Amino acid sequence: MIRVKICGIADAVGRDAALAAGADWLGFVFFALSPRAVTPAQAATLAAGWGGSRAQRVGLFVTPADEEVDAALAAARLDVLQVYASAERCLDLRQRFAVPVWQAVGVAVSADLPATAGGLDGFVIEPKPPIGAMRPGGNAVSFEYSLTRGWKAPAPWLLAGGLRPETVAGAIAASGAPAVDVSTGVESAPGHKDPALVAAFIAAARGV
């Protein structure tokens, strides 16, 4: 079964929608320039409403200082760190905090795909940010999903970037992705998840 991460959870509506639809991971963004950014205290409040769900909490960080990660872990009890940084820095965080780390990797050509895991637990594969972008990540832009079709992934991975309920099935088929990650594609406005879109996205991904 395709696994699904709903990223950029910033309010109870989004959290509850993702949990009700059966998301495998919910992502909290700890990056101030994002419209989906939350503080450790806000993430703690949202994480307290998990109920009996087995969904894991993922913290997204961009070149973070140790203190930033430590504060988020202490507040929200994160299960995974998704990090925009070099492989070396990602491994340092993995060793320092003893929490699984996924490195976010921007891809434009097949040579950009990781050849080794390097001690990390997974990768989020997405398009390289457009020139002039203020934020890392997919920026709601897709890429040539077939680049990953013949890739021998050295660790578990998620496909991200430009995914929507109506495109996710085709993206999975083209890429061979075992898991997908979405944020903008299930929003009614920046930072506000639409419950109907969340449910439709997960149903479409799981229907592949």
Image (spheres, rainbow, N blue to C red):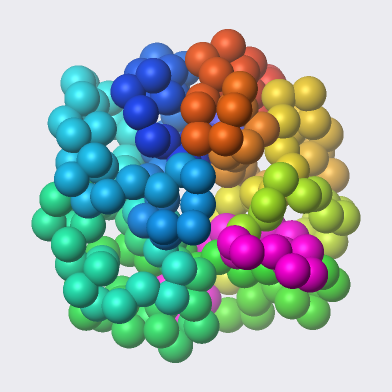
Please state, as top left, top right, bottom left or bottom right, where the C terminus lies in the image.
top right
Q: Which residue lies furthest to the top in this view?
A: 196
Residue 85 appears left or right of 116: left
- Queried whether the magenta region covers residue 125, the answer comes back as yes
Residue 6 appears left or right of 130: left
- Residue 155 in sight from this viewpoint: no
- Queried whether the magenta region covers residue 10, the answer comes back as no
Image position, residue 119 (x, y; %) = 41, 79
- Whether residue 192 is situated above or below residue 85 in the rendered picture: above
- Whether residue 28 is situated above or below residue 103 in the rendered picture: above
Residue 47 appears left or right of 140: left
Q: Residue furthest left?
A: 74
- Whether residue 146 is situated above or below residue 114 in the rendered picture: above
Q: Which residue lies furthest to the bottom in this view?
A: 88
Query: Which picture quadrant has residue 183?
Result: top right
Image position, residue 39 (x, y; %) = 27, 50
Q: As rendered, which of 57 and 157 lies closer to the eye?
A: 57
Question: Which residue is found at the position 59% from the left and 51% from the top?
Answer: 158
Query: Which picture quadrant has residue 199?
Result: top right
Image position, residue 43 (x, y; %) = 25, 42
Report the predominant secondary structure element of the magenta stretch. Answer: loop
Image position, residue 79 (x, y; %) = 27, 51
Q: As rendered, which of 89 and 204 lies closer to the eye?
A: 89
Q: How many numbered discs, if any?
A: 0
Question: Which residue is found at the position 70% from the left and 64% from the top?
Answer: 133
- Residue 204 in sight from this viewpoint: yes
Residue 36 appears left or right of 97: right
Q: As rendered, which of 192 and 113 lies closer to the eye?
A: 192
Question: Which residue is found at the position 61% from the left and 22% from the top?
Answer: 188
Query: Which picture quadrant has residue 184?
Result: top right
The span shown in magenta is 117-136
